[in-house]
Image (cartoon, grey):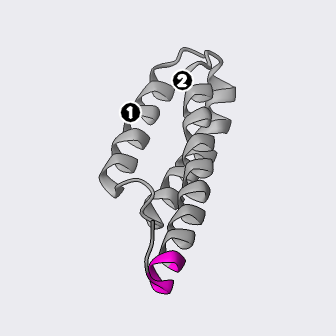
Amino acid sequence: MANHKSAEKRYRQSEKRRVHNKYYARTTRNAIKALRNTTDKAAAIALLPKVSSMLDKLAKINVIHKNKAANLKSSLTLYVNKLVA
């Protein structure tokens, strides 16, 4: 347990950030799963910019690493491009 006021505040801050980051990371993972499970090319093309934007935002605030975001975007783009119309 924290022994100082500053340590208690740091604990509150980190817990609040953890819950916030967990929510956005989970939402993005669900969107990625939805995109990967899509077999309709038109729906996948419509969903891709939204998922890419979510990944960019998570990388910007350091929830995920920027290279991980780039790798995910690349693999999702390849998946969408390989879908047959």
In the image, 45 versus 13, the foreground residue is 13
Classify mark 2: residues with Cα within 10 Å, few (<14), some (14-19) or many (20+).
Answer: some
Magenta-drawn segment? 4-9
The disc, 2 or 1, on the residue closer to the chain's N-terminal end is 2
Residue at screen point 59% across, 28% down: 35
Classify mark 1: residues with Cα within 10 Å, few (<14), some (14-19) or many (20+).
Answer: few
Image position of 77 with respect to 22: above or below:
above
The single residue placed furthest to the left in the displayed view is: 67
Q: Amino acid at mark 1?
A: Ser
Residue 3, position as x, y percentages in the image = 43, 77
Residue 17, position as x, y percentages in the image = 55, 64
Please identify the quarter of the rendering in which residue 47 is found.
Answer: top right
Residue at screen point 46% across, 33% down: 76
Residue 70 horizontal side relative to residue 10, left or right: left
The secondary structure that dominates the magenta segment is helix
Instruction: Say which quadrant the N terminus sits in.
Output: bottom left
Residue at screen point 43% across, 42% down: 73
In the image, 26 versus 14, the foreground residue is 14
Q: Amino acid at mark 2?
A: Arg
Please identify the quarter of the rendering in which residue 38 is found.
Answer: top right
In the image, 17 versus 60, the foreground residue is 17
In the image, 49 versus 29, the foreground residue is 29
The single residue placed furthest to the bottom in the displayed view is: 5
Residue matched to label 1: 75
For label 1, the SS is helix
Residue matched to label 2: 36
Was residue 12 drawn as part of the magenta stretch in this picture? no
For label 2, the SS is helix
Q: How many marks?
A: 2
Q: CA distance from mark 2 to mark 1?
A: 10 Å
Image position of 9 with respect to 69: above or below:
below
Residue 40, position as x, y percentages in the image = 65, 18
